[in-house]
Image (spheres, rainbow, N blue to C red):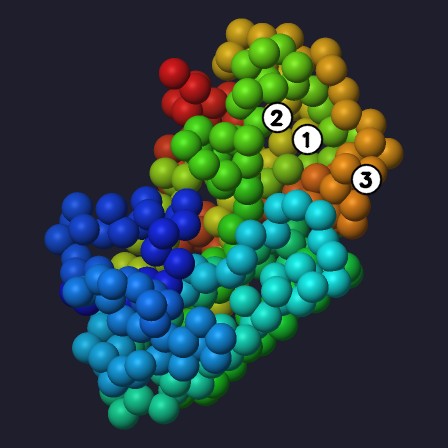
């Protein structure tokens, strides 16, 4: 089948395109207007207006993975870009999908477990309410922006990603140099919960959701056993056979990363993939030790 993907050059997008092509799907990346790709569909990078929206009617599914990176210090301008690249792009794409005479039957839209905010040891499923803070506000508005597509009868799924682990990219790639030198350690108290999934399991979950029509609304893409930052740190050190005695004080993290430290690095999110479990999806790497055994060669 034909599948259109925005954000096809990111960590998730690259792996998803490769896997879809391996199973015989025809992938059409949605690029900025200046891109040169014979298979690509184009949209304006400022207004997110599609050059040929009617081309989407030929697709059995659309997957929207766009959004600027959140890592780094957040200036006011950076926060506005983080917000707009998610909410505005999603609303514009939803509006254009809804206007089609025969829209694609399913639309998967990236979101994040930042929706829940920092909630300590509280167990969070898809039934939990939105939390407080900048990321929670962004995620809530991001998901609400898809309303025109839902109103048009499209099956809309919000992929609430946790931290995705892959040694070739994302957070794990950034951690490996320090941990490989024995300089890795817990952040702050180390008692904050981290909800994660291997990139491989996340891609498998996306394909599962595509194929299972009962999967709709928000779906947590996280392994079934979230762990504390202390246990995550210990497991990574053991996989690398390196000590993890170092510790990054919360005050240092805040000094280096500003607001992002509390919102992302020190936040506690104990998230469970309730909907995936109920639908019968199984994770190849359900716990952090199994994950690192597969990822660290």
Nearest the viewer among 72 and 90 is 72
Placement of the C terminus among the 4 image quadrants: top left
CB contact under 8 Å: marks 2 and 1: yes
Answer whether residue 28 is visible to the viewer in this image.
no
Q: For residue 191, what is the image quadrant?
A: top right
| Dot in front, 3 or 1 | 3
- Are discs 3 and 1 less than 8 Å apart at CB? no
- Residue for point 72% across, 11% down: 245
- Mark drawn on residue 232: 2
Left or right side of 7 for 177: right
* Disc sitting over residue 254 in the figure: 3
- Going from N to C along the chain, the mark reached first, 3 or 2, is 2
Compared with 145, 140 (above or below) is above
Q: Place residue 163 in its image quadrant.
A: top right
Q: Where's residue 30, x and y in %?
A: 32, 67
Q: Quadrant of the N terminus?
A: bottom left
Q: Residue at x 41, y 24 (%)?
A: 295
Q: Helix, strand, or loop for circle 3?
A: helix
- Tag 1's secondary structure? strand
- Count of picture labels: 3
């Amino acid at each position: 089948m034909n599948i259109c993907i925005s954000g096809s050059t990111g960590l998730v997008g690259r792996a998803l395109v490769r896997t879809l092509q391996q199973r015989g799907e025809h992938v059409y990346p949605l690029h900025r207007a200046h891109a040169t790709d014979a298979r690509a569909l184009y949209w304006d990078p400022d207004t997110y207006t599609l050059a040929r929206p009617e081309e989407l009617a030929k697709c059995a599914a659309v997957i929207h993975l766009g959004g600027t990176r959140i890592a780094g210090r957040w200036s006011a301008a950076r926060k506005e870009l983080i917000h707009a690249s998610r909410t505005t792009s999603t609303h514009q794409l939803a509006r254009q999908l809804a206007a089609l005479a025969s829209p694609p039957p399913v639309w998967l839209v990236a979101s994040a477990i930042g929706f829940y905010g920092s909630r300590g040891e509280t167990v969070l499923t898809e039934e939990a309410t939105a939390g407080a803070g900048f990321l929670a506000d962004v995620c809530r508005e991001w998901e609400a922006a898809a309303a025109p597509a839902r109103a048009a009868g499209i099956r809309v799924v919000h992929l609430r990603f946790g931290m995705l682990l892959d040694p070739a990219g994302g957070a794990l790639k950034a951690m490996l140099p320090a941990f490989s030198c024995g300089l890795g350690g817990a952040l702050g108290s180390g008692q904050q919960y981290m909800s994660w999934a291997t990139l491989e399991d996340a891609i498998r979950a996306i394909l599962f959701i595509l194929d299972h029509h009962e999967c709709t609304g928000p779906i947590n893409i996280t392994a079934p056993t979230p762990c504390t930052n202390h246990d995550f740190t210990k497991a990574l050190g053991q996989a690398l056979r390196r000590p993890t005695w170092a510790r990054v004080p919360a005050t240092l993290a805040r000094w280096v990363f500003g607001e992002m430290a509390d919102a992302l690095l020190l936040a506690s999110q104990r998230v469970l993939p309730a909907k995936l479990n109920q639908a019968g999806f199984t994770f190849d790497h359900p716990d952090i030790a199994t994950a690192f055994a597969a990822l660290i060669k």
